[in-house]
């Protein structure tokens, strides 16, 4: 029946074009009686295939399989054939030319051929079908939901409707739905996992991080974890990751449940999901056990599973070469199946694991270059460009650079930034760049600069701009766009409100660019609307004031309202975030007692240790560093809290890992200090203080301001190659006692990183460091880079006189 319908459709099209303009390709397809014959026709006529040809060919493929007994159907062989990939690509590119009947037929045929649901052509067909078939209907349903919302009390039904209508929901209806759901969640039982999941999925669809709703849903999900399977845990992880919502309680509970499910998860489909979610959190023995299981299942991996596994192995930096080889083998067999973006991610994962397979990397690079030359999607061009710049290989041809140049005008700011970083890498690796007056890179650099400025100058919605600026970093942005960005933000100051203040403040802190009008606006909005701001978002607001050391007129009021807002919610904070909050406050010399006592309680430190095991390595290390700095600040500035110093061993481990290199400027200052004091035995370099600060230079002056010498065993020598070297293990030696009336002087060279980007304004951590060194008994002499490198100080005598005035007054 289906074959007759397909053939009938083909015949009708043939008759429609008439007998004069015969469609020879269609005729060749119609007389095919076997799969190989059909693929041969497709391969010979790639350039001629129309949407009718593709529809007819895909329909016939399914009919060939349908006529075989089920045991003899080899769908894998069909799906991996190169010409099947041709049909998939053409089908995806020609969706707009399909009528409704053809669209649904094509979707059914691909489903019957067992095409993976995450395949792009399948997703595009489904999306197009929804748009065509259900847009008017869903629009009507959305209108009914809007009208009847006050009377809807069934959370299960409402959550299902929310998912269905999410593409058509306006911001006003979104807020009304969230308000209604908020009421219903209070009366929901702890077993309604699917309802809570659908609500989170709605927020994900809307790209809206609503913390109060997420926290309520998370409580319901937590209560269901003991009975959840791998699939549902995997879904929740994906939703939370998309929303950038962290819940250490969920991660710990999921870790325990997934560990319980290891032995019963024996199929490659479920085990892949288990591995992806559990491996980054698992202990080394559990991880090794999972890798051994994966090694046994690797031969069964599909193309998609191998792709997912490659990224998971990169995340945990696996050294299991046998497993890597098996995963790479599956990937290499299926290169023709992957989308360009997937191949880029695979290439990046394998490269960042230092996986050695020249043949595979050569093939990957060739496919990526070809994909880049053909691509017309901005996000795809951006990803391909970034990965090709990452992976070593031959210099790109001018046609490839021109393709990137042609796509730049369609890119978002974040994409422009990525492309600029990639072009910079290409230039560094191209020895001919400095020799050519007109380089193949020049035009793309000019286009990047022009498009970046135009995008900022024409922007008129702050929320959209902040979304694009979220991941902007690097030299190109700072040199070409940062000033323009700040001007744009000042132009939009009237759009700054309580909902976007945290994101704006985080961006300003990240750029290290001090803009007083923006900071004052952030302060006033925060003070006025503090009750509307979620406690977890307070950290983002305070960070810019702390990092940039900005003291607005309402400084005390800003910090007081922030502390008052977060204090009642201390127990509900993510442990690592609470540490970051307290560390941020410590920089500006604020130590709320309730907050400090909570953090340094045994229970909290135990929770923090458990959470750090589940965090990404970079965030875990940053949190440990901030806890140490907070511990040091509390010991020095708030001894009345009686918090013990327990980071000595941690700091010693850090010092062993650090390479104590001395910069050329520090080496220069060291020699001039020797001249000022009459010998280098009066100066110590890279001195470790109590509580493990490292001071650039230390000297001692007696009560008459005359220098005191150090013993030879305590002298740190600066070698010609610029390394600091102790003659003996002075880290274990105690500090020598000072004579009565003598003082220690810490001489600190302040490079540009100690100041805001656009001024000589010192950053918060620089001032905190000075405070702490003074508490430790030092007189601190600071040498700003802009003074040392100024025109006034361009001779040895001038530098020597400058140091004398700084040290001796």
Image (spheres, rainbow, N blue to C red):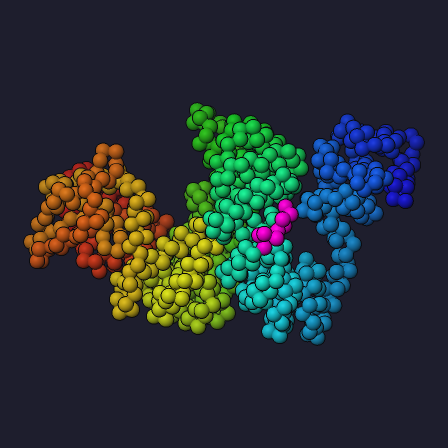
Residue 143 lies, in percent from the top left, at: 73, 66
Q: Quadrant of the N terminus?
A: top right
Q: Is residue 275 above or below residue 227?
A: above
Q: Is residue 513 magenta?
A: no
Q: Which residues are magenta?
A: 261-270
Q: Residue drawn 59% across and 41% down? A: 296
**Foreground pick, 465 / 165:** 165
Toward the front, the furthest residue is 263
Please tell me whether residue 91 is drawn above or below residue 760 in the rendered image.
above
Image point (64%, 47%), residue name: 267
Decide if residue 344 is in sight here: no
Q: Quadrant of residue 199?
A: bottom right
- Please say if 746 is above or below 62: below
* In front of the other: 340 or 263: 263
Instruction: Looking at this view, name the residue that lies furthest to the left.
Output: 704
Q: Position of residue 215 (x, y in %)?
A: 54, 66
């Amino acid at each position: 029946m289906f074959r007759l319908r397909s053939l009938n459709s083909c015949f009708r099209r043939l008759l429609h074009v008439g007998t004069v303009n015969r469609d020879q390709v269609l005729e060749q397809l119609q007389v095919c009686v076997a799969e190989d014959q059909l693929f041969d026709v497709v391969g010979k006529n790639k350039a001629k295939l129309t949407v009718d040809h593709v529809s007819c060919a895909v329909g016939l493929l399914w009919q060939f399989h349908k006529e075989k007994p089920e045991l003899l159907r080899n769908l894998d062989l069909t799906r991996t054939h190169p010409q099947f990939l041709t049909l998939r690509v053409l089908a995806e590119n020609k969706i707009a030319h399909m009528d409704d009947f053809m669209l649904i037929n094509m979707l059914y045929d691909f489903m019957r051929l067992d095409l993976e649901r995450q395949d792009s052509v399948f997703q595009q067909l489904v999306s197009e079908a929804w748009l065509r078939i259900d847009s008017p209907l869903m629009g009507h349903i959305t209108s009914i939901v809007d009208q009847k919302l006050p009377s809807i009390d069934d959370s299960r039904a409402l959550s299902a409707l929310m998912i269905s209508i999410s593409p058509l929901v306006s911001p006003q209806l979104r807020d009304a739905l969230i308000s209604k759901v908020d009421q219903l969640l209070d009366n929901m039982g702890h077993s309604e996992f699917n309802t809570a999941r659908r609500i989170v999925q709605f927020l994900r669809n809307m790209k809206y991080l609503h913390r109060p709703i997420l926290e309520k849903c998370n409580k319901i999900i937590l209560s269901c974890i003991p009975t959840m399977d791998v699939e549902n845990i995997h879904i929740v992880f994906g939703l939370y990751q998309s929303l950038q919502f962290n819940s250490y309680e969920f991660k710990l509970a999921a870790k325990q449940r997934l560990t319980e499910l290891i032995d019963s998860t024996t199929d490659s489909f479920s085990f892949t999901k288990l591995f992806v979610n559990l491996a980054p959190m698992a202990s080394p023995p559990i991880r090794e056990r999972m890798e051994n299981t994966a090694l046994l299942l690797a031969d069964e991996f599909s193309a998609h599973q191998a792709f997912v596994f490659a990224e998971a192995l990169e995340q945990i930096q696996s050294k299991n070469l046998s497993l890597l080889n098996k995963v790479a083998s599956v990937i290499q067999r299926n290169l023709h199946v992957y989308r360009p973006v997937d191949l880029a991610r695979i290439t990046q994962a394998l490269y960042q694991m230092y996986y050695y397979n020249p043949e595979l990397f050569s093939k990957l690079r060739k496919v990526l270059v070809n994909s880049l030359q053909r691509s017309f999607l901005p996000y795809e061009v951006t990803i391909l460009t970034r990965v090709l710049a990452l992976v070593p290989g031959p210099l790109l041809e001018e046609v490839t650079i021109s393709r990137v140049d042609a796509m730049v005008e369609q890119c978002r700011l974040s994409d422009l930034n990525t492309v600029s970083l990639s072009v910079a890498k290409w230039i560094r690796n191209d020895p001919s760049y400095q020799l050519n007056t007109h380089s193949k890179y020049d035009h793309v650099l000019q286009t990047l600069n022009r498009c970046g400025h135009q995008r900022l100058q024409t922007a008129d919605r702050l929320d959209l701009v902040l979304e694009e600026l979220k991941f902007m970093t690097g030299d190109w942005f700072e040199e070409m766009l940062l000033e323009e960005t700040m001007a744009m933000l000042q132009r939009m100051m009237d759009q700054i409100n309580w909902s976007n203040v945290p994101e704006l403040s985080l961006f300003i802190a990240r750029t290290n660019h001090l803009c007083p009008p923006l900071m004052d606006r952030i302060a006033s909005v925060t003070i006025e609307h503090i009750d509307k701001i979620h406690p977890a978002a307070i950290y983002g607001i305070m960070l810019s004031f702390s990092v940039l050391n900005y003291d607005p007129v309402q400084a005390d009021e800003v910090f007081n309202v922030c502390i008052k807002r977060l204090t009642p919610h201390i127990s509900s904070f993510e442990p690592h975030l609470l540490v970051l909050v307290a560390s941020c406050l410590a920089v500006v010399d604020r130590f709320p007692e309730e907050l400090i006592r909570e953090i340094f309680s045994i229970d909290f430190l135990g929770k923090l240790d458990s959470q750090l095991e589940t965090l990404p390595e970079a965030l875990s290390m940053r949190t440990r560093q901030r806890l140490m700095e907070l511990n040091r600040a509390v010991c020095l500035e708030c001894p009345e809290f009686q918090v013990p110093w327990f980071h000595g061993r941690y700091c010693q481990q850090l010092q062993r890992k650090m390479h104590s290199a001395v910069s050329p400027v520090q080496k220069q200052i060291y020699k001039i200090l020797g001249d000022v004091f009459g010998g280098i035995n009066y100066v110590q370099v890279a001195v470790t203080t109590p509580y493990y600060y490292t001071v650039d230079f230390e000297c001692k002056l007696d009560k008459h301001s005359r220098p005191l010498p150090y013993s030879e065993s305590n002298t740190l020598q600066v070698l010609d190659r610029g390394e600091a070297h102790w003659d003996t293990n002075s880290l274990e030696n105690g500090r020598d006692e000072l004579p009565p009336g003598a003082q220690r002087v810490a001489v600190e060279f302040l490079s540009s990183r100690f100041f805001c980007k656009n001024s000589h304004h010192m950053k918060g951590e620089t001032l905190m460091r000075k405070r702490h060194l003074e508490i430790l008994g030092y007189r601190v002499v600071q040498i700003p880079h802009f003074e040392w490198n100024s025109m006034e100080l361009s001779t040895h005598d001038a530098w020597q006189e400058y140091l004398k005035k700084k040290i001796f007054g």
